[in-house]
């Protein structure tokens, strides 16, 4: 995947996750935001829709802080597309502590399949494909 393709896909993800439809999914699950609880749902929906692999941003004490989706050499969350370095720096600036990107080995939030499918459909509707 070229940088321009990742940037374009990231912009489609941003648009979709800012939609009323996507926020209604968060509200249905009592999740606060895409950065606080909704990240696992988004990563699961991107895995279902695009075959993206879920990756964790893990603090030095081993706690998972954030879940993102990886396609090629780019990482995606509700804010767009990033290289590994960009994603770590963005998160470290937001949270104030160092993190490492690690391939997800366990689910940090069990996403109900019906909501993963619903969000994947919303993403597809907004041009994430």
Image (cartoon, rainbow, N blue to C red):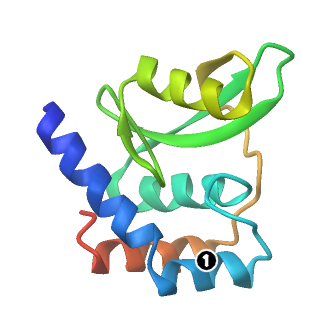
Which quarter of the rendering shows the C terminus? bottom left
- Residue 122 appears in view: yes
**Residue 75 at x, y percent in the picture:** 41, 35
Tell me: residue 67, above or below residue 21: above
Q: Which percent across, then down, holds residue 65?
A: 74, 36
| Picture residue at 64% right of the left edge, 24% below the top | 92
Q: Dividing the image into 4 quarters, which one contains the N terminus? A: top left
Image position of 111 (left or right of 20): right
Hey, which quadrant is residue 88 in on the image?
A: top right
Q: What is the quadrant of residue 11 in the picture?
A: bottom left
Task: Residue at 62%, 53% (x, y): give it.
Answer: 39
Can you say whether 28 is above or below 32 in the image?
below
For residue 95, side relative to residue 81 (left or right): right
Q: What secondary structure is found at the residue carrying circle 1?
A: helix
The image shows residue 98, relative to residue 126, as above or below, that is: above
Q: How many marks?
A: 1
Residue at 29% in and 76% down: 126
Viewer-nearest residue: 6 or 47:
6
- Label 1 crowd bin: few (<14), some (14–19), many (20+), radius 10 Å: some
Task: Pinpoint residue 12: horizontal percent, then vertical percent.
Answer: 28, 62
Residue 9: x %, y % from top left: 25, 52
- Residue located beneath label 1 in the image: 115
Regarding residue 1, the answer to whether it shows in the image is no
Residue depicted at 46% across the width and 72% down the height: 18
Q: Is residue 14 above or below residue 52?
A: below
Q: Nearer the viewer, residue 28 or 48?
A: 28
Q: Quadrant of residue 27?
A: bottom right
């Amino acid at each position: 995947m070229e940088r321009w393709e990742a940037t374009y896909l990231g912009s489609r993800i941003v648009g979709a996750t800012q939609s009323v439809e996507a926020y209604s999914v968060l509200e249905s699950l009592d999740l606060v935001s895409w950065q606080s609880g909704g990240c696992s749902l988004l990563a699961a929906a991107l895995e279902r829709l695009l075959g993206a692999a879920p990756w964790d941003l893990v603090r030095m004490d081993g706690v998972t802080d954030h879940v993102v989706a990886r396609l090629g050499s780019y990482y995606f969350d509700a804010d767009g597309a990033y290289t590994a370095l960009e994603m770590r720096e963005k998160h470290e600036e937001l949270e104030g502590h160092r993190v490492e990107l690690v391939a997800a080995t366990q689910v940090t939030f069990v996403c109900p399949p019906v909501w993963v499918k619903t969000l994947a459909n919303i993403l597809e509707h907004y041009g994430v494909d």
